[in-house]
Amino acid sequence: GSRFADVAQAPPDPILGVSEAFKACTDPNKLNLGVGAYRDEQLKPVVLSVVKKAESKIFARNENKEYLTIEGLDGFRKATVDLLLGGDHPAIKEGRVAVVQSLSGTGSLRVGAAFIARFMKGSTVYLSNPTWGNHRNIFGDEGVEWKYYRYFDADTVGLDFKGMVEDLKAAPPGSVVVLHGCAHNPTGIDPTKEQWASIADLCKERDLMPFFDVAYQGFATGDLDKDAFAPRLFVEKGLEIMVSQSYSKNLGLYGERVGALVMVLNDKEAATRCLSQLKRLARALYSNPPTHGARIAAEVVNDKELFEEWKGEMRGMAGRIERVRGELQRALEKKYPSKDWSFITKQIGMFSFTGLTPVQVDNMTNKHAIFMTRDGRISLAGLNSAKVEYLADAIVDSVR
Ligand code: PLP
């Protein structure tokens, strides 16, 4: 027998498990709306043209494969903070920003969680209810206590702003609040600008530490600056923030694992010391980050021409998603006019939170071979015009 005979089977990941089930399905009509990865109109994965161009330049330079520093590629670190705060931001000039290149959004969140576990001992992390499922694992596995704050209002299919504010007001000072920078996953519902301002003021009053998860900058509206509104506003209001950034979606670098953990602080000395500790944490977790993807991101963001082209490609991706959103809404309105489907185009980003119950989701999958997470979230990035009718019929069949 094995020493590990008593190790229990771990449950499949609720999101990545959907893709595994999709692969195993033989139905020719099958549709994967589970994972949040962009697909083109033929439902094929996309490598952005700017990424290919950046790679050609990188290959032409014939660079070596030696280790990066623990904090990562300098050109990338500059690029990522410029993208987040806008170039020439005073915080950058004043040296108040600590940044480590890390393993995409997830790894950056994990470094942040490790920092919280070590330097904010006893703090509770507040997560939106619902949130991206991995947040619980990331903080939980670091031994950080987490709780939910109210976020989604099922009745209005909108934001429960009152509940959110009540819960954050009740959070002990020194707590951490995880906020989705834009395009909230899974609901697709973001606070308005006024609501963001109130949340920032509340964080200030109650001494809460905002931790922005920025996984969709450029993907929500197609505009990098608009999508960075919230973290920039918090900084403008004098708050110190932590931010995890991901280039999985906006540059389509999913498997390259490109991202950063950023701390924008109020003084330079604190930023210097925090950076030294982030490096200490990263060193033990994975030593130093991977080279290739960071070179691509740096090349694209730091090159005027490629940067402009990237913006166009991002608008293209966001635009395709917006178009199928509209098509799906209209198809549902036609097939089931007595129900209000307007939430579909009110939500933004990659996902729609349909309100389908787990039983209805099972019907979608078992009867119609439409794969999605059991919380009722569908990724519109996995939908094309040709499949809209099929999806709408399945939804109507499942909710009737
Ligand atoms: N945060 C949110 C809200 C996400 O939706 C995702 C990806 O789905 C991530 C973080 C991290 O993704 P990655 O680790 O691929 O950057």
Image: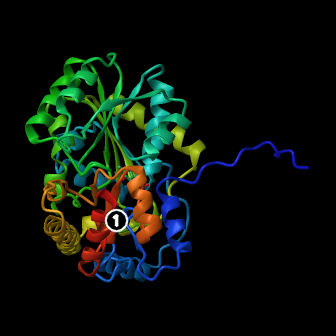
Q: What residue is rendered at 44% in x and 68% in y?
A: 367
Please provide percent x and percent y for residue 35: 41, 62
Residue 241, quarter of the rendered image? top left
Does 370 appear above or below 108? Answer: below
Please provide percent x and percent y for residue 316: 19, 74
Q: Is residue 121 left or right of residue 152?
A: right
User: How is the model colour-coded?
Assistant: rainbow
Q: Which residue is mark 1?
A: 297
Q: Is residue 103 visible?
A: yes
Q: Secondary structure at mark 1?
A: helix
**What residue occupies the far front of the structure in this picture?**
400
Of residues 333 and 296, which is closer to you in this image? 333
Q: Is residue 115 left or right of residue 298?
A: right
In the picture, which quadrant includes the C terminus? bottom left
Residue 342, quarter of the rendered image? bottom left
**What residue occupies the far right of the structure in this picture?**
1
**What residue occupies the far left of the structure in this picture?**
194
Q: Is residue 73 visible?
A: no
Q: Is residue 205 left or right of residue 98?
A: left
- At label 1, counting other C-alpha atoms closer than 10 Å, the crowd grade (few under 14, some 14-19, many 20 or more) is many
What is the count of numbered marks?
1
Q: What residue is rendered at 40% in x and 57% in y?
A: 361
Residue 159, quarter of the rendered image? top left
> Which amino acid is tagged 1?
Ala
Q: What residue is rendered at 26% in x and 36% in y?
A: 151
Please provide percent x and percent y for residue 113: 46, 36
